[in-house]
Image (spheres, grey):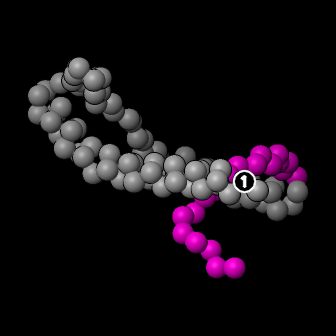
Amino acid sequence: MNQALLKKYADLKNQIKALELEVDAIQPEIMAGIEAQGADEVQTDFGKFILGRRRTYTYPEALVVAETNLKADKKEAEATGSATYVEKPYLLFKSGAVAE
């Protein structure tokens, strides 16, 4: 296996994680600033910042029970083999050396 390629991938994934932590740290301040202006977006020389909104729903108890029952039925179908599946490969990376 190409160790240089693996190292590059690991380095990039670690950089992404560090950058995402930085973004998460400053995001609330930016959102508060946009809201304080009474706007949903701010245009700058380097891009547009848009304050999006996502709806979340709370469902009636009957639907929650139906969903719970459906999940249980799905688990049973998986366990009995009546449900079918397809496996798709994906890559995981966890930083830090692994003892051999």
Q: Is residue 31 left or right of residue 99?
A: left
The correct choice, above or below, for 59 with respect to 74 in the image is above
In the image, the segment drawn in magenta is: 82-100
Instruction: Give the x, y percent position of residue 81.
Output: 88, 57
Residue at position x 29%, y 27% from top? 50
Q: Is residue 84 left or right of residue 21?
A: right
Q: Nearer the viewer, residue 88 or 95?
A: 95
Q: Nearer the viewer, residue 100 or 61?
A: 100
Q: Is residue 10 left or right of residue 77?
A: left
Residue at position x 57%, y 63% from top? 94
Image quadrant containing the N terminus:
bottom right
The correct choice, above or below, for 15 with respect to 57 in the image is below
Instruction: Give the x, y percent position of residue 92.
Output: 64, 56
Q: Main secondary structure of the magenta part?
A: loop
Instruction: Give the x, y percent position of residue 27.
Output: 27, 43
Examine the rendering and report whether any part of residue 16 can be seen.
yes
**Residue flagged by tag 1: what amino acid is it?**
Asn
Q: Nearer the viewer, residue 60 or 32?
A: 32
Instruction: Give the x, y percent position of residue 39.
Output: 18, 24
Image quadrant containing the C terminus:
bottom right
Q: For mark 1, what is the residue? A: 2
Q: Residues within 10 Å of mark 1 (few under 14, many from 20)?
A: few
The correct choice, above or below, for 57 with respect to 73 in the image is above
